[in-house]
Amino acid sequence: MLILTAKDIEKCYTMKAAIAADKQALKIYTQGNSDVPLRINFDMQKGQCLFMPAHIKGSDIVGIKIVSVFPNNPKLGKPSVPAQVLMLDPQTGEVCAMLDGTFVTQLRTGAVQGAATDLLARKDASRAVLIGTGGQAVSQLEAMLTVRPLTDVAIFDIDFQKAKQFTIDMKHHFSHFSTNLYFSQNLDEEISQADIITSVTTSKVVTFNGDKVKPGTHINGIGAYTPHMHEIPEVIVKNANIRVLDTKEGVLAEAGDIIDPIKQKLVSKNDFLELGDLVQNPMLCRQNDQQITLFKTVGTAVLDVYIGYDIYLKAKEKGIGTYL
Ligand SMILES: NC(=O)c1ccc[n+]([C@@H]2O[C@H](COP(=O)([O-])OP(=O)(O)OC[C@H]3O[C@@H](n4cnc5c(N)ncnc54)[C@H](O)[C@@H]3O)[C@@H](O)[C@H]2O)c1
């Protein structure tokens, strides 16, 4: 069994590869060529364990992400949300790889936004706004920088200190992109100039003023994952010209910012496409520079498992990782 840490994965796998893998994974999903059973949750005395398997038919890629939520772990010097992705060998059914699940989640979540931004944002998009500077934010920023040659990215968080430090760190980390990354407190002004907006927060309420969004903007909602969470303003869900979800099944069951406008009959379920539809048929992507486009994701095990196997193959090819 090959053990792959976050550092190992960084050495052998790029955001560009992750974006291509996510596009392929969601195309397979939308075509009905994967099995994704419902997540299994076990409540334990000190936390909760979640099991998320997926099977890609045809290529017989099978794997599972195991995520545990144990709030007291930090007192023991351990992460509160440990996660692993286990991959099985299609020939023997044996576990062939164990990958750092936290890093795989960050990578595939950034990449799915990158895939959507690539397919939906204006080709000449130059200014972006990143709202939220937590654990998912680095890969979200990297994905936007990867798919468009941005001149400026404004970085915002309700925690100004955190956003300031994140900006300093990212200027260093992503200096090779030569994009002007800057901390901003004036979100309304940034939103009114943005070509791409990515919100990746734990907020229960909308994170920006939808009335400030200009025609032609592409918006990504990454955070809200329960029916009580709303990150994307209703006016955007209602007025967007193209609305795309990673999976209809997941988003329409989990994301409050999409569920509520449907309940209020501002939009209907039929007004949403899946990202896999766009990968199969580029005619469904943006038609002109004035359209507002929206992408919402809550994640799916297909992404973890498809990308997990792709990383495993690349690591094996390059001789990276440790065999157990
Ligand atoms: N779509 C997916 O597949 C997927 C995958 C992983 C995580 N997520 C979700 O993404 C979200 C972010 O994850 P994370 O690990 O970065 O969380 P985190 O807790 O590390 O960081 C969240 C950040 O959001 C900021 N924030 C909260 N409310 C805000 C607001 N109103 N305006 C601006 N900033 C605000 C916080 O200050 C914090 O810095 C979570 O909701 C998580 O569940 C989604």
Image (cartoon, helix red, strand yellow):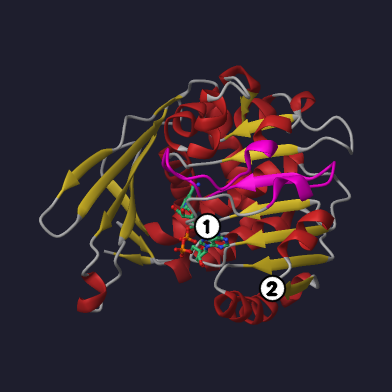
Left or right, residue 109 beside residue 213: left
Please tell me whether residue 234 belongs to the stretch shown in magenta.
yes
Residue farthest toward the left in the current orientation of the protein: 45
Where residue 295 sits, quadrant-wise, is top right
The 10 Å Cα crowd at callout 1, few under 14, some 14 to 19, many 20 or more, is: many
Give amino acid for label 2: Phe
Which residue is at 48% across, 65% downward?
135
Q: Which residue is mark 2?
A: 174
Say which of 303 and 244 sits in front. 244
What's the mark number on residue 201? 1
Q: Quadrant of the C terminus?
A: bottom left
Q: Could you tell me which secondary element the residue under label 1 belongs to?
A: loop
Please tell me whether residue 67 belongs to the stretch shown in magenta.
no
Relative image position of residue 199 (x, y in whole percent):
61, 54
Viewer-side label of 2, 1: 1
Relative image position of residue 316 (x, y in whole percent):
45, 57
Which residue is at 30% across, 70% downward?
79
Where residue 37 sits, quadrant-wise, is top left
Say which of 254 and 63 sits in front. 254
Say which of 1 and 55 sits in front. 55
Residue 306 against residue 79 in the figure, above or below: above
Which label's residue is closer to the chain start, 2 or 1? 2
Relative image position of residue 278 (x, y in whole percent):
69, 29
Give amino acid for label 1: Thr
Residue 230 against residue 30 in the figure, above or below: below
Q: Quadrant of the N terminus?
A: bottom left
Cα distance, mark 2 to mark 1? 21 Å
What's the mark number on residue 210? none
